[in-house]
Amino acid sequence: MGAAAYQSGDRLYSEYEHEWKSGDHLERIVHKEILLPPNAPEKYRDRATLWNAVDDVETKATAQTARRIIIALPKELTRDQNIDLIRNYCQTSFVDRGMIADFAVHDDKEGNPHAHVLLTMRSLNEQGKWNPKTRTEFVLDKNGERIQTANGKYKRRCVSWDGWNDRGNCEIWRHEWEAMQNAALEQAGRAERVDMRSYERQGIELVPTVHLGPAATAMERKGIRTDLGDHNRAVKIINSLFAAIKRALKTFAEWLREINEVISDHEKIDDPSSFPLYEVLFAYYDLRKKERWHWNIYAQNKTGARDLQTLSRTIIFLKEHNINTINDLAVLMTKTSDRIGELNAAKKTKEQRIRDIDAILEADKTIREFGPILEKYNGIFFKDAKEKYRQKHTDEIEKVKTAQRLLYKLKVTLPINKKALKAESSRLRGEVESMLPELETVKAEMDQLKIFRSQVRKVLPEALTVKYEDGKKSFQDMSEEIHNKDELRKLMEESAERAIRHAEEQRHIQQEQRYRQQKQIGAL
C-alpha cells in the first residue's frame, strides 16, 4: 500500500496496517492509471480497493504482495508520447498476460522522466477471484513417467501457478521494452535507438579513462588542462569513433549483401560482384537533373553546382580507393574491418598494461604506507595482544595483504622502478591517443560511403540495365523511363484533383439551382 501511495501521490488507508499511507514526495506526478485484464472486477480501478484486496488475500506475513518496476523513459519523446508508450508496454507485457498494472509517470526538476509500475502477483479466474500463487505437479523421469519414492508415494514439486515468477521473464520484459521504445522513437522521427544488453553482451569494448587524482581533478575544475585530462578527452573521442565505425561496417556489410541479392535477381546479370558502380552513380545524377526540369534557371544552376561538387568528391574517393565494382567495395570493407580489428587488439593490450601499471604503483604506495603496521602485527607473539592490535588496524592490514596478492599475481617483486613504470604508462597512453587520426580518417571514409550508398539505393533496382531480345537498354533509357513514369504519375494526380474540384463545383451549382426553384415555388 505504501508503494502505491508513493507512486500515485494519493493518501491511501491500509486496512491491513490500520493506518494512512501518504504519497507526498518531491517529484512531479504527470500521469497515473490502473490497467485491468478483462476478467478483473471494475472496482479494482480504485487504488485503495485494489491494494487492500491484494493484502487481504495474502495469509503469510512474509508474502510478496506486488512486483515493482521503475523504468526510465526516453527524453526524446514528448510527455504524451511517453505516457502512450508506457501504457502500451504495460498492456502488452503484463495486463494481456493477466496481471493488473498500476503505473504512474514522474518527472523531476532535472528533466528525468520515468515510470513506476506495480504489478499484482496473483492472476484472476473467470469469476474475478484471486488464483493461488503456486501449484504442485508430479516429477517425471526421462520417459515421462511419475517417479515413485521408497514409501510408495510419487514425487511432487511446487511450481508457479502462472509462470510469472520465472527468472527468464526479466529478459523477455527487457527485450519487449527495448523493442517498443525503438518503435516509438522511429515513429516520432528520432534517430536514437536503445539496447538493453550490457556492453559486454553487445561486444562493445571501451577504452578506460585514467584516474586523475585530486590534484589533476582540482586543476581541471578550474579550467586548467592537464595531460591526464587531455588523455581522457581523447579516449572519449576514440570510444565514439570505434563505436561509429563498427556500426558503419556492420551496416555496409548488410548493404553489400542487399545489393548482390538485388543485382543477382535481375535478369541476365550473371556476376553481381563485377557490376559497374560508376554507371549507377551517373544514373543517379541524371535522375537528379531530370527532377529539376520545372525549376527556374537560378535554382537549377545552384542545385546543379552543388550536385556536381558532391559527384566530384564521390568520384575522387572511388578512384583513390580503386573502387569500380561491388567486389572492389567489398575488398575495401574487408581491409577496413581487418585494420579496425588490429587497432582494437593493440588497444586492448595497451589498456591492460596501463591498468596493471596503475595497480602496481597504487599497491607499492599502500605497502610503503601501511607495510610497517603489518610487520609489527607479524612480530607480536602473544595471542591476546596480537588480536587486540589486529582489531585496531584491520583495514590497514587487509589493504597491505591485498596489495601483496596483486603484486604476486602480476609477478612483480619489490622494490619497483617507479620512474620506468610511469614512463611506460605515459608512452602507452600516447600510443592509444595516436590512433585518433587514423580512426578519424576511417570515419570520414565511412561518411563518404554513406553518401554513395544513398545514391545507389535511389536508382537500384530501377536503373539496372535490362536486356531484351533485340538488344540492351542503357542506363540513360532507364532513367528516362523512371522520369517519364514520375511525370505521368504527377499528371494523373493533377487530373484527378481537377476532376474532383469540377465535380464539387457542379454539385454546388445544382444545389443552388434547386434552392432557387424551391424558393420560387414557395413564393407562388
Image: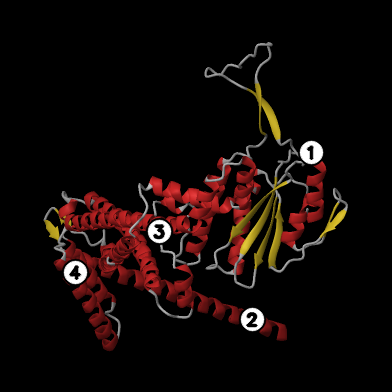
Say whether disc 2 or disc 4 marks the residue closer to the N-terminus.
4
The residue at the point 31 percent across, 67 percent down is 433
Q: To which residue does mark 3 refer?
A: 361
- Residue 108, picture quadrant: bottom right
The front one of 242 and 73 is 242
Q: Name the kind of residue labelled 4 in the image.
A: Phe
Instruction: Tell me the SS state at disc 2.
Output: helix
Say whether disc 3 or disc 2 marks the residue closer to the N-terminus.
3
Q: Which label belongs to residue 60?
A: 1
Above or below residue 77? Residue 293 is below
Task: Single out the mark in the foreground, 2 or 4.
Answer: 4
Marks 2/4: CA–CA distance: 72 Å
Q: Is residue 197 visible?
A: yes
Above or below residue 466? Residue 27 is below
Q: To which residue does mark 2 refer?
A: 515
Instruction: Tell me the SS state at disc 3.
Output: helix
